[in-house]
Image (spheres, rainbow, N blue to C red):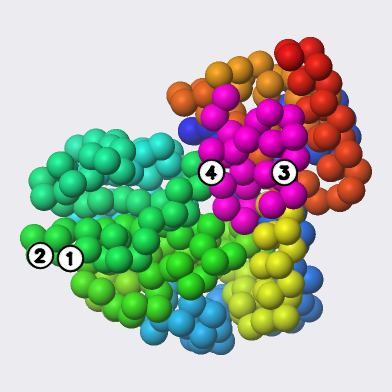
Amino acid sequence: MLEHGGRLRQAVLEYGIAEDDWVDLSTGIAPWAFPLPEITARAWARLPENEDGLEDAARSYYGFAHVLPVPGSQAAIQTLPRLRRSGRVGVLSPCYAEHAEGWRQAGHVVREISEDEVEHFIDSLDVLVVVNPNNPTGRLLSADCLLAWNARLNSRGGWLVVDEAFMDNTPRAGLARYGVQPGLIVLRSFGKFFGLAGVRLGFVLGEPRLLRLLADLIGPWAVSGPTRQLGQACLLDQPSQQAQIARCAAASERLAQCLRRHDLAPQGGCALFQSVAYEGAERLQDFLARRGILVRLFKQDSRLRFGLPAREGDWAQLESALGEYRKEHA
């Protein structure tokens, strides 16, 4: 299994700090979960059925006519590569590592490329995978850029796969509003913005024929009945969505200011995290962990990703630990 954030129990064992005493900033998940709706007994007792209201809620929320609910966007990341014969796949990196791994495991030749290298490689690729906004850098590519890449790929029967797991906070920057584009596949996560990652729900937006093929491969009853009811309620709850957008934006800006005060100016980020490239990243990650603060370390480019603190006590603990670190390493 690849390295991911959120491995709090592993940190508990490694550092000997009780689970309840941690400030977990290691994920890009909103720390405020949406209110849970009442789940009917029927949802638990019967096999789930499609078009029970979840698909309509998703169509309305994303502004896109063709959606496929999946048990977390991770399911689509692992399954999509099996819909194509072995080919050449470019993954705009660094990004969520499961993308490159999924295509490699399915027998494709994968090249991890930088944004500057896309122009050089794109006409030799069958598929290009982009995370937008990117995780962990926060890079946000324009819709015009992505649609132009998609047109070039599609002219040769290729795909552009865009993972918009962190797009809910800035929906106007997403690709759904441009409608169906041949060869374009958009992945949307549910758990991050709604703060409910444990329900395992995501959506794939794309051409109807491709969605049918993907659904057949994933199999029936992939999304549980209770999850379908919960997802529908959250997707229709516009007041809570607007409050979440505002709350995340304010917390992300506060986090960026906090990091700057301690000489850790972010090099990127989005509404759900801030990203710091720092040569002492591994040392700082360990320093914070010993004080009960878990952040995500990316060793390959010496980077730390800081998620949003949830409570005033969490902010105070982070400020105190960063102040200590700054004094010791001035």
Label 4 environment density (alpha carbons within 10 Å; few <14, some 14–19, many ≥20): some
Label 3 environment density (alpha carbons within 10 Å; few <14, some 14–19, many ≥20): some
Is mark 1 in CB contact (under 8 Å) with mark 2? Answer: yes
Q: Report how far apart the C-alphas of labels 2 and 4 lie in the structure.
A: 33 Å
Camera-near label (1 vs 4) is 4
Q: Which residue is mark 1?
A: 151
Q: Nearer the viewer, residue 152 or 48?
A: 152
Residue 255 within the magenta-colored segment of the rendering:
yes
Q: Residue at x 37, y 61 (%)?
A: 142
Q: Report how far apart the C-alphas of labels 3 and 2 lie in the structure.
A: 45 Å
Q: Residue at x 75, y 40 (%)?
A: 258
Camera-near label (1 vs 3) is 3
Camera-near label (3 vs 4) is 3
Q: Position of residue 61 (x, y in %)?
A: 54, 80
Of the residues shown, which amino acid type is indicated by label 4? Gly
Mark 1: which secondary structure?
helix
On the image, which quarter does residue 174 sit in?
A: bottom left
Q: Residue at x 18, y 46 (%)?
A: 119
Camera-near label (3 vs 2) is 3
Q: Nearer the viewer, residue 19 or 62?
A: 62
Q: Which residue is mark 2?
A: 155
Dot 3 or dot 4: first in sequence order is: 3
86 up-or-down from 181: above or below = above
Q: Which residue is mark 3?
A: 257
Dot 1 or dot 4: first in sequence order is: 1
Dot 1 or dot 3: first in sequence order is: 1
Dot 2 or dot 4: first in sequence order is: 2
Q: Which residue is mark 4?
A: 268
Query: Magenta span covers which residues?
Result: 253-278
Q: Position of residue 35 (x, y in %)?
A: 78, 71
Asked whether residue 39 is in view, the answer is no
